Amino acid sequence: MKFSGIGGQAVMEGVMMRNKDQYAVAVRLPNHEIHVDKRKDKFDLGIWKRIPIVRGVVSFFASLIVGIKALMYSASFYEEEEEQKELTEEEKAKKDRKEKAEMGGTLFFSMVVALVVFMMLPYYLSKACSYFVSSVSVMAFVEGVIRVTLFLLYVLLISQMEDIKRVFMYHGAEHKCINCIEHGLELNVENVRKSSRQHKRCGTSFIFIVFILSVFVFMFIRVDSHLLQLLLRLLLVPVIAGISYEFIQLAGRTDNKVMDILSRPGMWVQNMTTREPDDDMIEVGIASVEAVFDWKKFQEEMKSNQE
């Protein structure tokens, strides 16, 4: 296996694939055609991409912004017919401003909900054990178990929704396309179909590693004030995210047995967030890859390095 550097996510009836400063959104339209939109990522990491841990935090937010843009773009193809009329330049500008505001609102709301559900709720639920347990380390461990359990329950619940099931199928198509390329196989439907739907650089693994690392990091918070305990947890989240980013990047670049074993828990969780795609979905994934990545050149270089 060779590291390709490409990554992506599933969108509504499609796949977004990202390579360096370019990304493409491929969508299966209602008329069954595949529409591909290629764009340049305007978010420049600059000097931050050379600073370990910090680059992980910056990359996370950059990916989040691009991901929401891609989701909104893919959803636009499935608006009601009356919303699909031709727009004037003024109407387009107004719509663009509205979409940016909606994206900002969605991002803010998602972060608030995530902090409440996966940070504050586990913290206060774990405090219920203080009547039986006095150890700070044990309390932090219980809090971590609650946090991971809530995350798994959340994924399990949304996976029962029909629309989310299809998104998870496209997520599987995204992973299978990347695995196909990185294992030196020609990028076609047959080879993608037999490739794995698990990948070590998946965002699901990233989130799961963040939760696992937080269990151990929060054990070192030894202050009496509940408010200060919560504040320190919030301040440490970017640090934990940065470390998790470095871990999955290293795991994705190596076939080291130790890294493979450490990556397994996150990849097991991917069994919940990915599903086997059909051939139509695989075709969409392939279209997205080919819009931003020269996989033939990549594999030629892979073969020449092996000789």
Image (cartoon, rainbow, N blue to C red):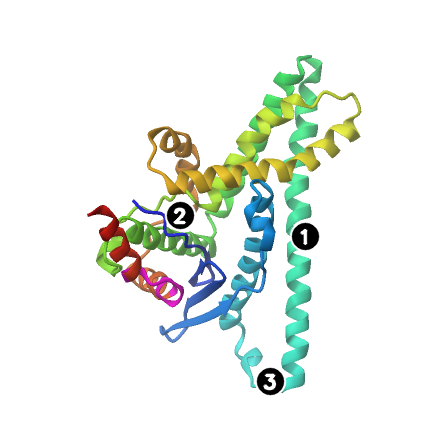
Q: Nearer the viewer, residue 178 or 73?
A: 178
Callout 3, which amino acid?
A: Leu
Residue at the extreme left? 307
Q: Residue at x 70, y 17 (%)?
A: 130
For disc 1, the marked residue is 109
CA gap between label 2 and label 3 equals 37 Å
Is 27 left, or right, of 214 in this rendering? left
**Badge number at residue 274:** 2
> Is residue 181 within the magenta segment?
no
| Amino acid type, callout 2 | Thr
Q: Is residue 137 above or below residue 56?
A: above
Residue 55 rendering spot, x and y as whole percentages: 57, 46
Q: Which residues are magenta?
A: 288-296
**Disc on res. 305:** none
Residue 156 appears in the picture as rendered:
no
Among the two numbered marks 2 and 3 on one chain, the one whose residue lies closer to the N terminus: 3
